[in-house]
Amino acid sequence: MIKIKHSAIIILLIIVQSVSAQQHEINSESLVKLLDGNLRFTSGSSIHGNQSLDRVKEVVKGQHPFAIIVGCSDSRVPPEVVFDQGVGDLFVIRTAGNLVDDIAMGSIEYAVEHLHVPLIMVLGHEKCGAVDAALHGGEAPGQIQKLIDKIKPAVDATASLPGDKLDNAVINNIKRIVDQLKHSKPIIEEFLHHKKINIVGARYDLDEGKVTLVD
Ligand SMILES: [Zn+2]
């Protein structure tokens, strides 16, 4: 009897490990797809897949994007282009400074919970104007000040670091938003806990068009 129980535990462990590995694979697969697409883009060999009218018709019945991109509104960083993706591939949220407010969070939660998208990438970029505005301080008109206030902690946290002040703040801002997402209750934190999603930060290089993961 004890032997049977022992075997059952081992089988259960194998199943759990297998499911976990599978989930990890699913998450990695999305990341590999993004990075492969960026490699095609930077090497001038974009294939512009899923951009035909046939694809438009194919996804009428439903969308199954493989990644959520939380990017900056900056016109130089269009996710579908820099990752060489097409219609129905990416679920994109774009705000200046790639910030996440309640509405953006709701959009992300919808994609995670309802569309089962397994990867969230926070995509900041070189020479981000929103981060630069926060770096230079001062009062901004209208709602722009809210953006600056949200980015200011990243500027303050990196003020004493050596190197490029703007880039340091850009990286810190990416990490903060990744952290914000990882601790967002109840949906994202729970999906993360069950290894159903992966959240990564990345920086886009304006000169080369290259996306590099941020640890
Ligand atoms: Zn920007």
Image: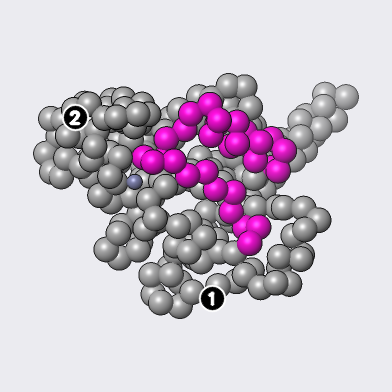
Residue 128 is inside the magenta segment: no
Question: Is 178 in front, or is 135?
Answer: 135
* Residues at marks 1 and 2, CA–CA distance in whole angstroms: 42 Å
State whether residue 89 is above or below residue 70. below
| Residue range highlighted in magenta | 87-116
Looking at the image, tell me whether mark 1 or mark 2 is earlier in sequence order.
1
Q: Quadrant of the N terminus?
A: top right
Q: Which residue is mark 1?
A: 47
Instruction: Describe residue 200's horizontal placement relative to residue 167 as left or right.
Output: right
Q: Amino acid at mark 1?
A: Ile
Residue at x 30%, y 59% (from the top left corner) = 206
Residue 94, given in percent of the width and then of the height, sits at 47, 44
Quadrant where the image shows the C terminus: top left
Give how far across and how far down residue 17 sits, in percent. 67, 40
Q: How is the image coloured?
A: one colour
The answer to whether any part of residue 212 appears in the image is no
Marker count (numbered) = 2
Residue at (63, 27) in percent of width and height: 187
Picture quadrant of residue 13: top right
Q: Decide: few, some or many residues near mark 2? Use Cα within 10 Å; few <14, some 14-19, many ≥20.
A: some
Q: Secondary structure at mark 1?
A: loop
Q: Secondary structure at mark 2?
A: loop
Residue identified by numbered label 2: 137
